[in-house]
Amino acid sequence: MKKTGRPEIPRKAIYRLSVYLRCLHRLKANSIRTVSSDALAAAAGVKPTQLRKDLTYFGQFGTRGLGYDVEQLAKMITDLLGTNSLQPVILVGVGNLGLALLSYRGFEQEGFEIVAAFDVDPDRKREKTVTQPIHGMDKLAGFVRDRGARMAILTVPAVVAQEVANQLVEAGITGILNFSPIVLQVPEEVMVNNVNLAIELENLSYFIQD
Amino acid sequence: MKKTGRPEIPRKAIYRLSVYLRCLHRLKANSIRTVSSDALAAAAGVKPTQLRKDLTYFGQFGTRGLGYDVEQLAKMITDLLGTNSLQPVILVGVGNLGLALLSYRGFEQEGFEIVAAFDVDPDRKREKTVTQPIHGMDKLAGFVRDRGARMAILTVPAVVAQEVANQLVEAGITGILNFSPIVLQVPEEVMVNNVNLAIELENLSYFIQD
């Protein structure tokens, strides 16, 4: 999907920029104002050449020998990622994992706010209470339209995941963080990132065998 | 890390094998006994050429024109992934996310059992009860040794993640599923898979901008 006026940056480079941003936040919290590319690369766990290549997306900046200005670089990455204002995110499927994500406070620090949750059974008694409202699925389309939400976290069982994904796309969601262990079929303009914990464990399992 | 007597399979191929395995389980649940490579590829969301290439790791099998035997292929993949017996996994850091993962029932279906959790404050009142015991960190090394656990899920805050990872490695853990937003420095023989929800959201955020 071509973005007009924005550089075409590969997905893996975007991941690395997110990691650099976290390192910069830690430096800033420690009152460190400039950082060399070697030091930032080491903190992020990448090679200095990789870091310098990734930062060329921002054109020329930084003063040779002085390194990067921590605050300026953090701002440039934040602007690029589009996380400079709090983005509304909805969550669909309020089971155990959904509940945990609703009460996970880490998202807001990163520029995301889960504003509401949706479930086929919104009134079911749950193991803990969350601050966000839990609505029925019939409220989804109207809510997404009214709030202008674009991103959704999908934590429904695999058997209904495709059907719910269709509803999300129809409602205007263009980015889905999918926790269901299936490959979602979506239109080209919709982006899906998959987080599958069992697959991550399986992958580890293979690599740690004797 | 070279595994004696086992094929060197790239990490991405291992991920795809996990996805094929899930598709095969669904086919089996629907009493389907054979599947063509085209149909299995479509279910997994990959190209048929990719699927056939991935399955060459198992050598020649399948009957031309008849497709793959669902049960046989599932067993071969399970054996390769090392998930044919329930693997003990420990979890370190019992906050919101840790609690959710402890009560998530999806892992056992996939061959993993979280047998115990560890936390700096095991007795703190938590929002829900879990079936696994929660121990103090001083019990970690002994438990890992006695149970022969090799895999750990790390859900501690970023500031202590490296320190805790060091303790895990020292205790004999060789596979870490890391939820902390930092790059862990570990010895070469230890495998780390990172699951960073905020980074996934940030990545989506970039790609859905106009």
Image (cartoon, coloured by chain):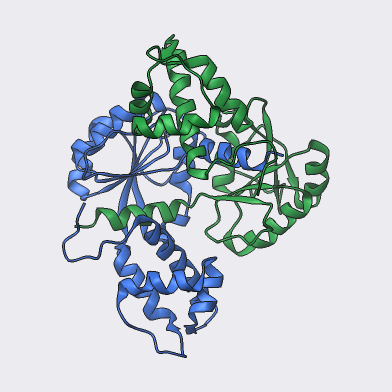
Chain colours: A blue, B green
The answer to whether residue B168 is seen in the rendering is yes
Question: In the figure, is residue A169 to the left or right of A27?
Answer: left
The answer to whether residue A183 is seen in the rendering is no
Above or below B149: residue B183: below
Residue lying at 72% horizontally and 37% vertically, measured from the top left: B133
Residue A177, horizontal then vertical, whole percent: 37, 44
In which image quadrant can residue B103 be found? top right
Residue A89, horizontal then vertical, whole percent: 32, 49
Residue lying at 45% horizontally and 51% vertically, measured from the top left: B197
Question: In the figure, is residue A63 to the left or right of B137?
Answer: left
Which quarter of the figure is the C terminus of chain B placed in? bottom left
Residue B195, horizontal then vertical, whole percent: 51, 49
In which image quadrant can residue A159 be found? top left
Above or below A172: residue B81: above
Residue lying at 40% horizontally and 12% vertically, measured from the top left: B66
Question: In the figure, is residue A100 to the left or right of A138?
Answer: right
- A135 vs A200, nearest the viewer: A200
Above or below A175: residue B87: above
Residue A62, horizontal then vertical, whole percent: 38, 85
Question: In the figure, is residue A175 to the left or right of B27?
Answer: left
